[in-house]
Structures are given as C-alpha cells and as structure tokens.
Image (cartoon, rainbow, N blue to C red):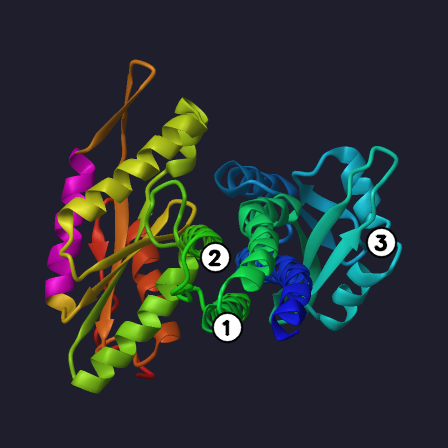
Amino acid sequence: MAFILVAALLPLIGLLAERHQRTAVARDADIQARRLAGVIAHEVGAEVEQGRALDHEQLQRRLDELRRHIGGDVEILDLRRDIVANTMPAALARRVVTDPEGRIAATLRDGEIRTVNVSADAAGEAMRLAVVPIRTPEGIVGALLLDYTDLHAQLLNSSAPIRRSTLGAAMAGMAVSLALAYLLSRGLIRDIRHLTFTAEQLAGGDYAARATVTSRGELRQLATAFNQMADRIAERRAELTDLAVTDALTELPNRRHMRSSLTRELQRARREGRPLGLVILDLDHFKAVNDEYGHLAGDAVLRRVGEVLKRELRSSDVAGRPGGEEFAVLLPDTGRDAAMAIAERLRAALAKETVRHRDRTVTFTASFGVVSFPDDGQDAEALVQRADDALYAAKRAGRDQVQAPPVDRPGL
C-alpha cells in the first residue's frame, strides 16, 4: 500500500515542482530586471545631479546603445508621465504610459520599485515591466521602465527541459516505485527533495547552488538539466553585472565603478598610511573632433584613449571613463610627484597617437588635473573637486598639459 501511495503522489510532486520552478524563474527574472533598471536609473540620476536636465537626445543615444548590448526596451518618463526617451515601439509606448492600474504614478509619488504586468492588447502582446524611480538629491525627477518580457521568456524557455524532465521523472518514478524495493524508492524521494531544495536556493539568490543525486536514469538527467539551467542563469547574471559597471565603448570601468573604487582605495590608503594618486583627464576640443570628422571618429578617439591607458598604466592602477570625453585614473601607493610624472607620460603618449578615419588622420591631446591623498584632500569629494580645479587650470593655461592644485590651498 505504501508503494502504491508513493506512486500516486509522485505525479503530484512533479506538478508541484514544475510549478515551483516556473515561480522561481519568474522571481529571478524580476530580481535581475529590478537590479539592471536600478543601475540605469542611477546613472541617469547622476547626470541630472551634475546639473543636466533629462535631455532627450542624450538619453535616447544611451538607450539605443544599451538595447544593442543587452536587448530589451527601456522607456524614461518625467513626473508628468511624458515620454523623454524610449526604445519601445510607438504603440507599446503609448499603451504603457496610460498606466491603467496607476502603478507607474505610484512609483513617481513614493519612490517604490515595482514590477508591472501589462495585459495583452489586440495584437496579443503582453509585457512585463520593472518601474524604478530616477532620483537626485532634490527628489524624484522621473521613472525608468524596463521591458524584461524577453528576459523572462528566455529564462522560462531555458528551464523548459528541466520542467519537462521533472514531470517525466515523476512519471518514471511512479513506475519505478512499483517495481523497485523500498530502499530504492526512499533514495529517489530523497533526491527529489534535494532537487526541490536546490531550486529554492537558486530562487533565493544562491547562484552557486547545484544539484547532486545518487540515483541513475531520468533523475540524474533531471539534475544535469537543472545544473545546466543554473549555469546559464549564473552566466547571464555575470553579463548583466559586467554591463552595469563597464563602459561599453572603451571597456573601461564606468562612473559607478570608479566611485566605488575610489572609496575602496581611499579606505585602504587611510588604513595602511599610504598615499593615493588621482588623475582626471579631459580631451581637448573634443566637440571640434565630432563636428569636423563625425561621431564615429570621436568614438574611435575615445577607444584609442582607453587603449593607451591600459597600455601605459600598471596592473595595480585603475583607469575608467566617468562619461563623455573625461577619463580618470586611480594610482595606489603613489604620491603627488610620482602621479605628476605618470600623468605627464600619459599626456605625451596621447599627443603622439593618431586615429585614421575615412582616409583622414585625427590627432588629439588631453589636459590633466592631478591630486593625491592625503596632501590634497581627506575624502573622495575633496579630491575630485581639487582634481577638477587643476584640470580646468590646465585648460585655461593652454591645454595639453598637466596641472596640480597649489599645495598651500587654505581650508585643508
């Protein structure tokens, strides 16, 4: 009777496990979409914080570039729910901003991150959206909507083999439970429980969770399929994390990564009593390069600057592109004099570089501002401000040169 009861329960267990796996996939897609949307919204808010408005043309270029790299559509709304920039088809964009359930408006009011399911329209197209507020120190200035329908579908499709295998294993288990001994049946149930527990770990954010079973046949195939799905989810998450902290054009760390690196290196320098150099460089007359040669030539120049920084710097140094034509370099264990020498070497190296674009030779130079901890400031804000001051002094002095702030600046 016990074996018959087990045989009857196994299909039910398979159905419950298949439903749980669907729920786990949907939860993982929601988590990844919220995180990615939060990163993009943070970058937009950082630009507004620096004094820029929600600029349609600049945001549209950013969204188009983002779509080319990771796919998915993004829409940015202002406080009136007017579309500032988007990559969605026009019909879908209009359907989203109608906000029939008022969830987008709620996010604009209270700043809570939400996910929204937009029901299918006449064409049968349903959408899953992550809604994230765009914040500045003055408050919420808009909202970013990320369409992660394709991400959810990809994760669901990638889990289809394991869900089919789950049901198949349940049916196979029913037959096996009637034919095999009690100990074999007990081992089978134990492995199913382990698979369910591992699925819960993966859904809870433990992307290193993998299934191990002692059984053979269908259940082992199920465990293999589960592990393959977990590997794909982990790879996808790693790709999204890399995109969140890397500038797509130069493959250097972006502003978010450089801020966290500066904070981390300052803590280490303060703890160990060592100096830390900071160099900020800005390309001279870069707008003229774009105007004369075109934006493709400008992009080629930015990539070449990234290549020179990687080539000329030490493995312990951190070079990044905070945005536009501005770059930054962190120099651990480096005082002001040594940082000035490194900046001068970089300046000379860039001045020698040329870029060929449509049978034309593009030359470029850069101006540098150099500071060091602790001589020029005790925290990240002070160091960045003084480096900017030195950079603008280099610009005023004629460009293509390296400047440091005066050592006797009051207030330090």
- Residue 340 is inside the magenta segment: yes
Instruction: Name the residue tied to disc 2.
Output: 219
**Amino acid carrying mark 1 in the image:** Tyr
**Amino acid carrying mark 2 in the image:** Leu
Label 3 vs label 2: CA separation?
A: 45 Å
Residue 182's disc number: 1
Residue 129 location (% of width, % of height):
70, 53
Mark 1 or 3, nearer chain start: 3
Q: Nearer the viewer, residue 122 or 18?
A: 18
In which quadrant will I find the N terminus? bottom right
Left or right: residue 303 compared with residue 78: left
Asked if residue 292 is positioned above or below residue 350 in the image, the reply reads above
At 44% from the left and 50% from the top, the residue drawn is 232
At 60% from the left and 42% from the top, the residue drawn is 72
Residue 389 location (% of width, % of height):
34, 63
Occupied quadrant, residue 283: top left
Count residues near mark 3 (Cα–Cα under 10 Å), then give few for <14, some for 14-19, many for 20+: some
Asked if residue 75 is positioned above or below residue 208 in the image, the reply reads above
Residue 295's disc number: none
Count residues near mark 2 (Cα–Cα under 10 Å), then give few for <14, some for 14-19, many for 20+: many
The secondary element bearing badge 1 is classed as: helix
Which circle, 2 or 1, is nearer the viewer? Answer: 1
Label 2 vs label 1: CA separation?
A: 17 Å
- The span shown in magenta is 338-352
Residue 99's disc number: 3
The secondary element bearing badge 2 is classed as: helix
Count residues near mark 1 (Cα–Cα under 10 Å), then give few for <14, some for 14-19, many for 20+: few
In which quadrant will I find the C terminus? bottom left
**Amino acid carrying mark 3 in the image:** Asp
